[in-house]
Image: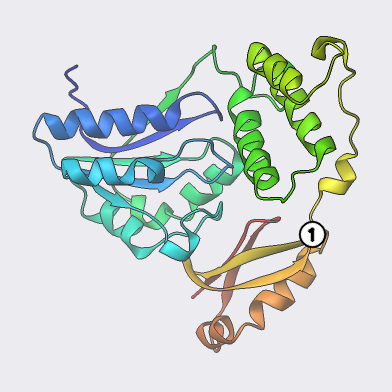
Amino acid sequence: MKTDINGIVIIVGNYGSGKTETAVNLAATARKQGKTVKIADLDLVNPYFRTREARISLEEMGVEVVLPDKKYMHADLPILTPAVAGMIQTPAQLTILDAGGDDTGVTVLAALAEAFKGRSIQMLQVINPFRPFTQDIEGLTFNTAISALMVLSNHIAGLDPPPREAVKNLILLVHPFAPHLAEECWELIGEAQPLSSIPWIEWDETLCEDEMVTIGVQVNGKLRGEVSLAKNADEEEVRIRALSLEKVSALSEGKTIRKFIYIPGKIVNVVVK
């Protein structure tokens, strides 16, 4: 495939659209054509596959990959390092921003507005009708469900012995995705009743909710600390806690707080001047 796309390119798309795969493939193709390529991972909306997951392969090809600090490598926080703004100000022949697909993604891009000023930007939206954005099995969001099942399977495997009821429930959950495998596992644990006749598991969503969240606190787009607080904390409480952090207080002392941006459960960005 030959591509003539150059300059700064923002790639967006709904969750599950294949947006990140497009970004990675575009970077790899351009690099094979001999272009200098930079790519930044700004995909922060609970993605299933992110640019950071392809980091090693891209770097081996000579693509410069810009990511958050290692301690936040697997966090879904809009932590913008100076390197992101720097790659916009000194772009490669192709500079790709893999951005999130909802309002959080928009907020992250807005934080880079100063770096974008006076520059020509292309935005590509990936639309894939075969991978729709939905929240449940009925909507065909299989990737997140399977990912969660892998986490559950690993947890159960680490128990000694694994609780039989938990194993049964895991097999029931696998059944919609891999019915033949699930039926075989069902027989292996000695269940005689056909799996297809077993009622679906009842569950209580409220038991899955975290009461506390830890969010990053930025000053002018740079991470300066984090605070842990109740999930339902109002913005005023978040503001008080964030501004009381030692580094935040020192950086804002004697300055005007122009904006206080709070994305519930994810990030705070204090803009001072």
Q: Considering depth in this image, is 57 or 248 the residue closer to the camera?
A: 57
Picture coordinates of residue 136, whole percent (x, y): 73, 25
Q: Could you tell me the amino acid type at mark 1?
A: Lys
Crowding at dot 1, Cα within 10 Å, few <14 / some 14-19 / many 20+, comes out as some
Q: For the point 23% across and 32% down, which residue is it? A: 28
Please say if 87 is above or below 206. below
Q: Quadrant of the N terminus?
A: top left
Q: Relative to 42, is 88 on the left or the right?
A: left
Q: Tell whether 84 sits left or right of 246.
A: left
Q: Position of residue 242 (x, y in %)?
A: 66, 75
Q: Is residue 191 left or right of residue 37?
A: right
Observer-nearest of 74 and 259: 74
Horizontal and vertical percent for residue 149?
66, 34
The residue lying at 49 percent from left, 61 percent from top is 72
Question: On the image, numbered disc 1 is attached to which residue?
Answer: 231
Q: Of helix, strand and loop, which one carries label 1?
A: loop
Q: In which quarter of the image is residue 27?
A: top left
